Image (cartoon, helix red, strand yellow):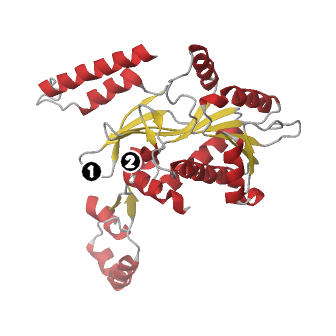
Amino acid sequence: ACSTSMSFATYARAHAHARASVPVSARAPSARIASMRAPVNARARAALSTRASTEDDADAEAPKLTITKMRDDDELPDNLFDAVGCAARCTSAAMKRGVAGSVVELLIPELWDPMSGNVMSESGDQLKVWEISREFMQQLVKNGSKVRAVFPDAGAAAMLKARWGGADCGFEIASVDDRALVGEDFDGVLVFAAPDPMSLEKVQRATGRANELGCPVVLLNPRLASGDAGVGLNVRRMRDNFLGKMTVTYSLRPLPWCNGSVFKAYPGQWKLFLEDTEEPGRFRLIDEFAQRPAGEELDDIVEQALRPLGDDGETAEKTTAQKFLSVMKDMQRFMRSLSS
């Protein structure tokens, strides 16, 4: 959609990377069959001389072998459309394996801040989020799912029905406030688009009801954990307990402060990628984790990975500037602990 073009461009610039193809001739001796022939004696060479020109012509016409050099960052998406398609495929695979609750995080740098969560600074930003949701729903439908998309309020649901043509969009559109959100005859996939803290209880009830009927639930870009201002301790505990039972099937979370990303694609593990300074546009895999790296753990891992090596190959001592930054990070951690 036109309204999302800026998001797609920003996302593509942040995560695009080229595929490296290396001809064999540039890396090793010629791969032609003729070059691998064993030596022959003089008599045999004379007998074969009449066929030499024919074989040489055949060798010259044979296509050159090209090897594609695989890299760890090849699994990162090329652009936002690629990310949405991969997220839908991973989620479909998880549902086929019996995963009842999935979480998908497609976080665009211009619409999301790593500290405060979703940022809607421009008038059309919310519509961009809905268009991303629409693309995800349609990809799920292509993968064979019957989808009911649930939006945070009745106004948004009505507006999107009119904008997308109702049933013509390929999936049902509903609101979290609908009374018959999950009826006895429901047999599809319930997808909550950007659910917020105010709708937490309704989302939980609908999720429980859908799971009782054997229907999977997906939380797409949930805002349930995006900032705790005005959210009581009991609500936070209820939210954390609810999200703790879900499986993250796809997540691409940018780390602009270190030019990296925390990435997961079901059934793989969590992975930390940082920009490859020696090859612009590429990323290097730092490590893999069974649980999402976050907070102090993530800060320490990134700091260690970015610290230069000394002449002996060991990590060099911190500079004065690096020590100062570490102190500032410790202060930030302390302030975060006071607000949690």
Residue type pointed to by label 2 = Arg
Percent of width and height locating residue 205:
75, 27
Identify which residue is drawn at 41% across, 31% down.
115
Mark 2 secondary-structure assignment: loop
- Name above or below for residue 315 compared with residue 268: above
* Callout count: 2
Which label number is shown at residue 71?
A: 2
Identify which residue is drawn at 29% across, 18% down.
330
Which label number is shown at residue 336?
A: none
Identify which residue is drawn at 35% across, 78% down.
60
Which label number is shown at residue 279?
A: 1
Percent of width and height locating residue 114:
42, 34
Left or right of residue 49: residue 233: right
Left or right of residue 199: residue 322: left
Percent of width and height locating residue 83:
52, 49
Earlier sequence position, callout 1 versus callout 2: 2
